[in-house]
Image (cartoon, rainbow, N blue to C red):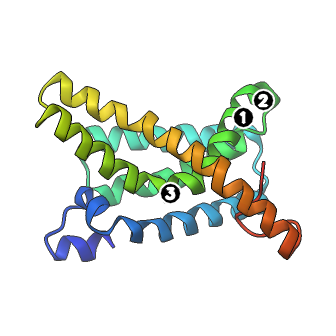
Amino acid sequence: MFLLAAGQGVLFTDMTTRIGALQTVPAVLLGTALWRLHGELRLPPSAGALIGALALAWIVAASAWRLSDLAIWPAFGPLVLGLAAAAASKRLSRAARGFAALGRLAIAMQLVYLPVDIVYFRAAHLLLGEPRGWVAWLALLGVFPVILLAAAAAHRFVQRPLAAWADRRLGPGAPLLQPD
Protein backbone atom coordinates (compact mmCIF):
# COMPACT_ATOMS: atom_id res chain seq x y z
CA MET A 1 0.00 0.00 0.00
CA PHE A 2 2.82 2.37 0.89
CA LEU A 3 4.60 1.86 -2.42
CA LEU A 4 1.39 2.12 -4.44
CA ALA A 5 0.46 5.35 -2.67
CA ALA A 6 3.96 6.79 -3.07
CA GLY A 7 3.78 5.99 -6.79
CA GLN A 8 0.65 8.12 -6.96
CA GLY A 9 2.27 10.98 -5.02
CA VAL A 10 0.36 10.31 -1.79
CA LEU A 11 2.42 10.54 1.39
CA PHE A 12 1.95 7.69 3.85
CA THR A 13 1.08 10.19 6.58
CA ASP A 14 -1.75 11.50 4.38
CA MET A 15 -3.23 8.03 3.95
CA THR A 16 -5.28 8.34 7.13
CA THR A 17 -7.63 10.90 5.65
CA ARG A 18 -7.49 9.59 2.09
CA ILE A 19 -7.71 5.80 2.45
CA GLY A 20 -7.71 5.22 6.21
CA ALA A 21 -10.39 2.55 6.08
CA LEU A 22 -8.17 0.41 3.86
CA GLN A 23 -5.37 0.32 6.42
CA THR A 24 -7.71 -1.27 8.96
CA VAL A 25 -7.78 -4.56 7.04
CA PRO A 26 -4.01 -5.24 7.11
CA ALA A 27 -3.83 -3.99 10.72
CA VAL A 28 -6.51 -6.45 11.86
CA LEU A 29 -4.91 -9.23 9.81
CA LEU A 30 -1.50 -8.49 11.35
CA GLY A 31 -3.00 -8.45 14.85
CA THR A 32 -4.78 -11.74 14.24
CA ALA A 33 -1.62 -13.33 12.84
CA LEU A 34 0.40 -12.13 15.85
CA TRP A 35 -2.23 -13.50 18.24
CA ARG A 36 -2.07 -16.89 16.49
CA LEU A 37 1.74 -16.82 16.40
CA HIS A 38 1.90 -16.01 20.11
CA GLY A 39 -0.47 -18.90 20.81
CA GLU A 40 1.69 -21.30 18.79
CA LEU A 41 5.14 -20.16 19.98
CA ARG A 42 4.42 -19.69 23.68
CA LEU A 43 7.52 -17.52 24.05
CA PRO A 44 8.86 -17.22 27.58
CA PRO A 45 8.32 -13.78 29.14
CA SER A 46 12.07 -13.03 29.07
CA ALA A 47 12.22 -13.67 25.31
CA GLY A 48 9.15 -11.49 24.82
CA ALA A 49 10.74 -8.68 26.82
CA LEU A 50 13.90 -8.92 24.70
CA ILE A 51 11.94 -8.94 21.43
CA GLY A 52 9.84 -5.99 22.59
CA ALA A 53 12.89 -4.02 23.76
CA LEU A 54 14.77 -4.63 20.51
CA ALA A 55 11.74 -3.65 18.41
CA LEU A 56 11.21 -0.48 20.46
CA ALA A 57 14.91 0.42 20.18
CA TRP A 58 14.71 -0.03 16.40
CA ILE A 59 11.55 2.10 16.15
CA VAL A 60 13.14 4.93 18.14
CA ALA A 61 16.48 4.75 16.29
CA ALA A 62 14.94 4.44 12.83
CA SER A 63 12.63 7.37 13.60
CA ALA A 64 15.54 9.47 14.85
CA TRP A 65 17.51 8.61 11.69
CA ARG A 66 14.40 9.58 9.68
CA LEU A 67 14.36 6.29 7.79
CA SER A 68 11.49 5.40 5.49
CA ASP A 69 8.20 4.35 7.03
CA LEU A 70 8.81 1.00 5.34
CA ALA A 71 11.77 0.50 7.72
CA ILE A 72 9.88 1.63 10.83
CA TRP A 73 6.28 0.39 10.80
CA PRO A 74 6.95 -3.37 10.43
CA ALA A 75 8.79 -3.29 13.78
CA PHE A 76 5.50 -2.60 15.55
CA GLY A 77 4.51 -6.25 14.91
CA PRO A 78 7.43 -7.69 16.91
CA LEU A 79 6.86 -4.99 19.54
CA VAL A 80 3.27 -6.17 20.04
CA LEU A 81 4.33 -9.83 20.00
CA GLY A 82 7.07 -9.15 22.54
CA LEU A 83 4.71 -7.24 24.82
CA ALA A 84 2.16 -10.06 24.64
CA ALA A 85 4.78 -12.65 25.63
CA ALA A 86 6.31 -10.42 28.33
CA ALA A 87 2.86 -9.76 29.81
CA ALA A 88 2.72 -13.40 30.92
CA SER A 89 5.41 -12.68 33.52
CA LYS A 90 4.24 -12.76 37.13
CA ARG A 91 6.24 -9.57 37.76
CA LEU A 92 4.26 -7.76 35.08
CA SER A 93 0.83 -8.90 36.17
CA ARG A 94 -0.43 -5.37 36.94
CA ALA A 95 1.02 -3.98 33.71
CA ALA A 96 -0.30 -7.03 31.84
CA ARG A 97 -3.85 -6.22 32.94
CA GLY A 98 -3.39 -2.74 31.48
CA PHE A 99 -2.07 -4.12 28.19
CA ALA A 100 -4.90 -6.68 28.12
CA ALA A 101 -7.44 -3.87 28.60
CA LEU A 102 -5.85 -1.91 25.74
CA GLY A 103 -5.86 -5.08 23.64
CA ARG A 104 -9.61 -5.46 24.17
CA LEU A 105 -10.02 -1.90 22.91
CA ALA A 106 -7.90 -2.52 19.80
CA ILE A 107 -10.74 -3.56 17.49
CA ALA A 108 -12.94 -0.69 18.62
CA MET A 109 -10.01 1.70 18.24
CA GLN A 110 -9.45 0.55 14.66
CA LEU A 111 -13.07 1.36 13.92
CA VAL A 112 -13.34 4.77 15.60
CA TYR A 113 -9.95 6.44 15.29
CA LEU A 114 -10.39 7.82 11.78
CA PRO A 115 -13.79 9.51 12.25
CA VAL A 116 -12.76 10.75 15.72
CA ASP A 117 -9.48 12.08 14.31
CA ILE A 118 -11.25 13.92 11.50
CA VAL A 119 -13.96 15.41 13.75
CA TYR A 120 -11.42 16.35 16.46
CA PHE A 121 -9.09 18.22 14.14
CA ARG A 122 -11.91 19.93 12.26
CA ALA A 123 -13.36 21.08 15.60
CA ALA A 124 -9.91 22.21 16.75
CA HIS A 125 -9.47 24.17 13.53
CA LEU A 126 -12.88 25.83 13.97
CA LEU A 127 -12.17 26.73 17.60
CA LEU A 128 -8.48 27.64 17.35
CA GLY A 129 -7.95 28.53 13.73
CA GLU A 130 -4.69 27.15 12.38
CA PRO A 131 -2.90 26.01 15.57
CA ARG A 132 0.74 27.04 15.80
CA GLY A 133 3.55 26.46 18.27
CA TRP A 134 2.67 24.96 21.63
CA VAL A 135 -1.06 25.12 20.80
CA ALA A 136 -0.48 22.80 17.84
CA TRP A 137 1.42 20.37 20.08
CA LEU A 138 -1.32 20.53 22.69
CA ALA A 139 -3.98 19.86 20.05
CA LEU A 140 -1.95 16.94 18.69
CA LEU A 141 -1.47 15.41 22.15
CA GLY A 142 -5.15 15.90 22.97
CA VAL A 143 -6.40 13.64 20.18
CA PHE A 144 -4.99 10.48 21.76
CA PRO A 145 -7.10 10.48 24.94
CA VAL A 146 -10.16 11.45 22.90
CA ILE A 147 -9.64 8.46 20.58
CA LEU A 148 -9.06 6.19 23.59
CA LEU A 149 -12.30 7.38 25.24
CA ALA A 150 -14.24 6.91 22.01
CA ALA A 151 -12.78 3.40 21.63
CA ALA A 152 -13.70 2.55 25.23
CA ALA A 153 -17.27 3.72 24.60
CA ALA A 154 -17.48 1.76 21.32
CA HIS A 155 -16.10 -1.32 23.08
CA ARG A 156 -18.56 -1.02 25.97
CA PHE A 157 -21.68 -0.12 24.01
CA VAL A 158 -21.10 -1.84 20.64
CA GLN A 159 -18.36 -4.48 20.69
CA ARG A 160 -19.26 -6.20 24.00
CA PRO A 161 -23.00 -6.43 23.27
CA LEU A 162 -22.22 -7.68 19.76
CA ALA A 163 -19.85 -10.31 21.20
CA ALA A 164 -22.48 -11.45 23.68
CA TRP A 165 -25.05 -11.68 20.88
CA ALA A 166 -22.59 -13.62 18.68
CA ASP A 167 -21.90 -16.03 21.54
CA ARG A 168 -25.62 -16.67 21.93
CA ARG A 169 -26.25 -17.03 18.20
CA LEU A 170 -23.00 -18.61 16.96
CA GLY A 171 -21.68 -20.29 20.10
CA PRO A 172 -18.92 -19.23 22.49
CA GLY A 173 -15.66 -18.09 20.98
CA ALA A 174 -16.83 -16.31 17.83
CA PRO A 175 -13.61 -14.98 16.24
CA LEU A 176 -12.46 -11.47 17.21
CA LEU A 177 -15.56 -10.79 19.28
CA GLN A 178 -14.52 -12.06 22.70
CA PRO A 179 -16.33 -10.11 25.45
CA ASP A 180 -14.46 -9.13 28.61
Circles 1 and 2: CB distance less than 8 Å?
A: yes
Relative to 5, 175 lies left or right? right
Q: Mark on residue 15?
A: none
Pick whichever of labels 2 and 3 is earlier in the sequence. Answer: 2
Q: Nearer the viewer, residue 40 or 95?
A: 95
Residue where numbered disc 3 is placed: 110
Amino acid at pointer 1: Ala
Spatial CA span between label 1 and label 2: 5 Å
Residue where numbered disc 1 is placed: 96
Which of the two marks, 2 or 3, is nearer to us in this view? 3
Relative to 70, 44 lies left or right? right
- Dividing the picture into quadrants, the one containing residue 15 is bottom left
Relative to 45, 171 lies left or right? right
Spatial CA span between label 2 and label 3: 26 Å
Seen at 34% across and 38% down, the residue is 61
Q: Nearer the viewer, residue 150 or 10?
A: 150
Amino acid at pointer 2: Ser
Q: Position of residue 48 (x, y in %)?
A: 67, 43
Residue where numbered disc 2 is placed: 93
Seen at 64% across and 56% down, the residue is 158
Dot 3 crowding, Cα within 10 Å, few <14, some 14–19, many 20+:
some
112 up-or-down from 26: above or below: above
Dot 1 crowding, Cα within 10 Å, few <14, some 14–19, many 20+:
some
- Dividing the picture into quadrants, the one containing residue 141 is top left
Element on which disc 2 rests = helix
